[in-house]
Amino acid sequence: MVAIIDYGAGNLHSVAKAIQKLGYQPCVSSQREEIERADVIIFPGVGSAGDATGNLKKLGLDVTLKKLNSEKRPIFGVCLGLQLFMEYSEEDGGYECLNLLPGTVKKLPPGNKIPHMGWNQVNQVFVHPIFHGIPDGTNFYFVHSYYADVKDKHIVAGVTDYGISFPSIVVRDNLVATQFHPEKSGDLGLMMYKNFLEMYIKK
Amino acid sequence: MLTKRIIPCLDVTGGRVVKGISFVQLRDAGDPVELAAFYDKEGADELVFLDITASSDHRDIMADVVARVSEQVFIPLTVGGGLRNLEDMRRILESGADKVAINTSAVQNPVLVKEGARKFGSQCIVVAVDAKRRDSQAVPLSGSPVAVDKNSKWEVYIHGGRTPTGVDALKWAKYVADLGAGEILLTSMDADGHQTGYDNELNRTVSEAITIPVIASGGAGTIEHLYEAIVDGKADAVLAASIFHYGTFSIKEVKLYLGAKGIPVRI
């Protein structure tokens, strides 16, 4: 079972539909027990970040995510999900994040339209099964105003240019997190979810 | 590099796409799911569904259309037409839309832009602006910060372009961007339907005045028109209906053309 964490941040249904399309069973949930039982956890998110951490705490899901990560359970973070994995975010006057990955969430530099909205290339930094069947430089769909400035460069699996070169996919052990939306990136976006699911679920 | 988006617009009424492409080998050119899948395969970067149904029972039908499309097509979907309040927006977003476009309701109640952005995130809120060039007649001034004045070049129209509002289109675009809109869908009413090119003075003026993306709409008749909207109009995305629906050009042809001219596109 694939748990999609529901903490009121939206976009859950698109992710669920993508998982379903791939032939897996999605379960949109905010229940700790249910999430802990899942084979794979997806942590999606779009929208205003200030509320997100508050909601996570209210539901006790911050603790759940930290616990699952310490157990090296497979977790896929998307967009705001990636940002919330970091230590700290400068959005909305600043707030503490989950501290699963080292680094800070910062505003994209001025000079380009913000939000960064649309299809942009992900330049692969190292070879990883998450990229199986996905050519280097493939366009994925982005929509965000902040980015994760990851401290540990060894975990940055792909970068994207928008005024600066920022980490667009991060991979560390059990954790994969993307700044783009695989569920909105057509066939190759679905392929990325498929690659992740196949690493952990025997069909 | 961020690519320029090519966006076909599909008009939906009673759950059916009107102006469907008849030449293509589709089983049913009026079926939103089939058309969406077709455009996706052609390389559309996003899809806009515009609900043009006048009756009040359209929301259920539209929600159902969105749900069915989003189960099959995995690119961003924007839905507009008749969304009046947060509840209408929530309904469509939960059905599977990624963004909602609001026009008349935003002008009548600008707080809706702010509340929608707060509740669903700025990236969800597209403000559709129907702009028409003003003649040079003197205009009455009002106290509104977005009211037309003697320097206003374009005025906002609502109710599908039937009602002038006295709102200056440029001021309005800046205003809704500040309220939290994530994007402007800018339609030139002067150019719309004529297939003689976009109003690129309008596109450029608005695009350079705000930091959020602008989708240029209205007037595409040739492949060059889309190029001009990007280069002269500084548009971040171009929307077209007729040229795609009637098969004048395919999305693939448009992208190959733009790519050859040095415009970054996703091919």
Image (cartoon, coloured by chain):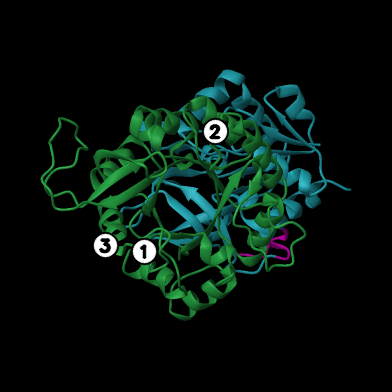
Chain colours: A cyan, B green
Where's the C terminus of chain B, which quadrant? bottom right
Residue B172 higher or lower than A63, as above or below:
below
Quadrant housing residue A9: top right
Name the outermost residue toward the right.
Answer: A203
The amino acid on which the numbered mark 1 sits, given as a three-letter code, is: Tyr
Classify 10 Å Cα crowding around label 3: few (below 14), some (14-19), many (20 and above).
Answer: few
Magenta range: A124-133
| Contact, mark 1 vs mark 2 (Cβ under 8 Å) | no
- Left or right of B267? Residue B218 is left
Report which residue position mark 2 lands on.
A98
Query: Crowding near pointer 1: few (<14 within 10 Å), some, many (20+)?
Result: many
Relative horizontal placement of residue A24, taking residue A115 as reference (left or right):
right
Residue at x 61% of width, y 39% of height: A44
- Amino acid type at circle 2 is Leu
Q: Quadrant of residue B194?
A: bottom left
Describe the element under mark 2 as helix, strand or loop. loop
